[in-house]
Amino acid sequence: MLEYYFPNEAAEPLLWHPVLFAYTLLVSGADLLILAALAYLAGSLRKAIPLMTMLGIAFFAVVLAGPLADLRSPQRAHLIFANPQIVPTAAHPGISLTAFQTIAWLIALILSVLFALLTFSYHSHQASLSSTGFKRSFYRLFSLGVTTAEKYSVVEKVAKVVAVLMLPFLVLWGIYPASLFLLQTWNPVWRSWALLPVTYFADTFVVATALFMLVYFLWRYRAWEREVVVPVLKIHAAGSISVAALTGLQMAVWWFWSPSTAEMVSPLVPLMYAVIALLMLSFFLSLVAIRYHAVILAVSLVAMAGTFVNKWNITINSQLISKTGLAFLEAELKGAWLLETISPIALGVAVFLVLSMLFPLEVMESGK
Amino acid sequence: MLIDVDKCYGCMACVVACAAETNVPLGSFRTWIEHLVKPDGTRIFVPKQCNHCDDPPCVPPCPTGATYRTADGLVLVNDELCIGCGACVKACPYGARYMNPVKGVADKCTFCDHRLAAGLLPACVEVCPTGARIFGPLHEDNELSRTVRGRPVQVLKPHTGANPQIYYLSLPDEVNR
C-alpha cells in the first residue's frame, strides 16, 4: 500500500478513543430492551423479561457516558439538547444523526422506565404486602395503585402500547453507531461497509443474549430453567450465525466487486476472520447448550470475545485507515485509556446492581 | 479560490503565513502543500486546505449547529457551540479539519474571515510570491470568475458531491485524493 495520508490525520490518527468501543458495547447491551419489548408483545419469555428490562435500562441509562468521556469540551455537552441540529436550515443543511439519536435516547429511556414501572406495578404491590417500613412505602409507591389482577390486566395493555412505542427508538439506537459511520463520515472503510448497519443490528442480539446468559449464569448458577434458557439460546444462535455470515459476505463483496477496497481493508481482515471463527463457534456451542445447559457460560464468553474483537476492529482499527485509503496509520494509546474504556461499562453494572436490589429479577407466570 | 498548480513551487510561505495569522497548533494544518514526483522526475506541488464546499459534508453531522455555512459561502465553526465531538473532522473528505488541543474545539481554515471583514485578502493569498492563489467572489466579474468560466478547472474528490469551492488549474490525477 502506498503511504499517503493527510497531515492532520497524522496529528491525531485515533480521533475517537477506545471509549467509543465501550460505548458501542453498551448500546448492544442496552438492546436487551428490544428483546424485552418483543418478548412482552409476543407473550413469551415472561420469566426472563424482568432481568432483560433491568439489564437493558441499566446500560441504556449510562450509554451516553461513553461519548461524554470522549468530548473535548464536555462542559458544553448540554447544547446537544439545548441546540440540537435536527431541523435543516440554509446555514445548517442536513440533520445530525448524533443530535437526533440523543433526543431519541431521552424519549426511549423515559418509555423504557415507564415500561418497567408498568410491568412491575402489580409485583411491587405484592412485594409491599410482605414488606415493612421503608421497603413497604417504596413498593407501594412503585405499585402505581395497581392492587388487583383486574387493574393489572388494564396496565398490561398500556404496557404493550409503550413497548410498541419504544421499539423504533431502540432499533434506531441498535444501528446508530453503524449508521453514523456509514452515512456521516468519510472514513473509506466505514463508507464502503454497506452491511455495517444490518451487522450491528444482528450483533445487538448476540451481545444482548450473551450478556443475559452471563448474568443468568452468575445469578442462578446451575438452577436454570429450560423455558428461559432455550429461547434465549435460539435467538443467540441466530444472531451469531447472522453476524458471521454478514461479515463474510462483506469481505466477499469487497474481494469480488472492489479489489481496491479489498486491498485497503487488508489490515482489518485477520480480525474479521477471527470474528467469523468465534461467532461460528458460539453458534455451534449454542446448539450444544440447548441440550447440555452447562455450556451456556462458554456460549456467552465466546460470543463476547467475538463481539469485542469485531467492535474493536470496526471502531478502532478502521479509524486508522487514512481518508486517502492509501495508508494504515499507527496510534499509541495514551494515559488511562483502559480505565476510561471500562468505566462506562462499570457504571452500567453498578446501576444494574442497584436496580436488582430494588426490583425482582424474575416473576412467575401467574404474576407472582 | 483558484489555485494554479503550475505556479506553485512549494515555498511553504502560505503554510507559514496561515499558521502565524491564525495561531495553528503545532502538528495541525489549515493549509498544507502536497509534493508529487512524477516518474519523469517532474516535481509538482499542490496546496490544499478546506474547500468551503457548497454542500459541505462536515455541517450536517454537527450535533449542536456549531459548524455552519455563511451567506457568503464560508464554512465556519462557532467555538462557543462546539462540544468537541469530532464528528465534523470525521466527515470532511479532505482531511482539512483537526481538533484544536488548546481550545478543545474543531478547527479549520476560515479564509481569514477577520481579514476579509477588514477588506484584506486571506493571509495565504497575500503572501504567495507567484500568485498561485486567486481569491474573490465567484458571482462577480473578476480574474477568479473569468478563469473558472474560461479555462478547464478541476476540484478535489468531485465524487463526494460536496461541490468544493476551491478550483484548481493543472491538477494532476495522482493528487486528487
Image (spheres, coloured by chain):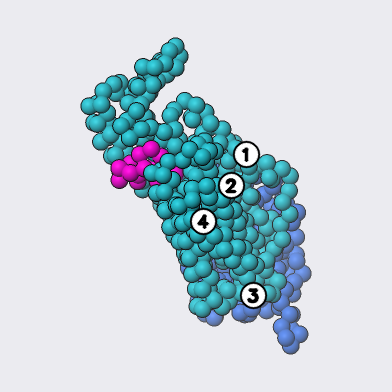
Q: Secondary structure at mark 4?
A: helix
Q: Chain of mark 1?
A: A
Find the distance from the CA under tag 3 to the CA under tag 1: 43 Å
Image colour for chain B is blue
Q: Residue at x 43, y 13 (%)?
A: A132
Find the distance from the CA under tag 2 to the CA under tag 1: 9 Å
Q: Chain of mark 2?
A: A
- In this view, the mark in front (2 or 3): 2
Label annotation for residue A22: 2
Find the distance from the CA under tag 1 to the CA under tag 4: 30 Å
Residue B60: image x %, image y %?
Answer: 48, 54
Q: Secondary structure at mark 1?
A: helix
Image colour for chain A is cyan
Task: Identify the amino acid type marked 3.
Answer: Val
In the image, taking residue A145 as reference, residue A235 lies left or right, namely right
Residue A334's place in the image compared with A254, above or below, is above
Label annotation for residue B175: 3
Q: Secondary structure at mark 2?
A: helix
Label annotation for residue A343: 1
